[in-house]
Amino acid sequence: MKKRRITAASVYRLGLPLLFSVYILLCLITLSVLSLITSRQNLRNENLQKEAREAYFAAENQAEDRIKEIDEEVLTRIDMPLEETFTIPIDEKKTLEVGLKRTAEENRYRITEWKTIVSEYEGEDTVKGLTSGKEAD
């Protein structure tokens, strides 16, 4: 029997397509892992945003209930102050501040202020290249 002689051409016939297939497989695995990491981070961010929205809406509902109580008190009491401000906690670092001013013609309160106040500021906020607005020294 004759022995087959291995030539460079026969190695290229099998080796290059195999290497190319392995390279494509590694690229696909890398892209799928990166996609998985990105989607998990997006889910985590969305959950944090959802919790923040729910906390804000709960504080907003409490503020509206408090305004309703104050508005009902105005109808029964005459000695109510002309202006009133109260705060509702949103979370550990944020509060909702509501300011009311009494209107003379309707004997009711009008909302003059409705804002979120951050009690602690730690470090610089940067989101997608936007800074917190602090000027550089």
Image (cartoon, grey):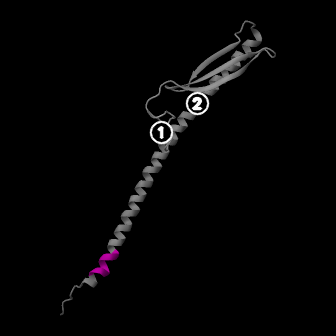
136 to the left or right of 63: left
| Label drawn at residue 126 | 1
- Image location (x, y in percent) of residue 100: 68, 18
Image-based side of 41 in relation to 77, left or right: left
Q: Residue at x 51, y 40 (%)?
A: 47
| On-image quarter of the C terminus | top left
Q: Is residue 133 left or right of residue 97?
A: left
The part of the chain drawn in magenta is: 11-17
Q: Position of residue 112 (x, y in %)?
A: 69, 22
Taken as a whole, is the magenta stretch helix, strand or loop? helix
Q: Earlier in the sequence, mark 1 or mark 2?
A: 2
Residue 71: x %, y % from top left: 73, 17
What mark, if any, has residue 53 been given in the picture? Answer: none
Describe the element under mark 1 as helix, strand or loop: loop
Q: In which image quadrant can residue 86 be found?
A: top right
Within 10 Å of the Cα at label 2, are there few (<14), some (14-19), or many (20+) other Cα atoms? many
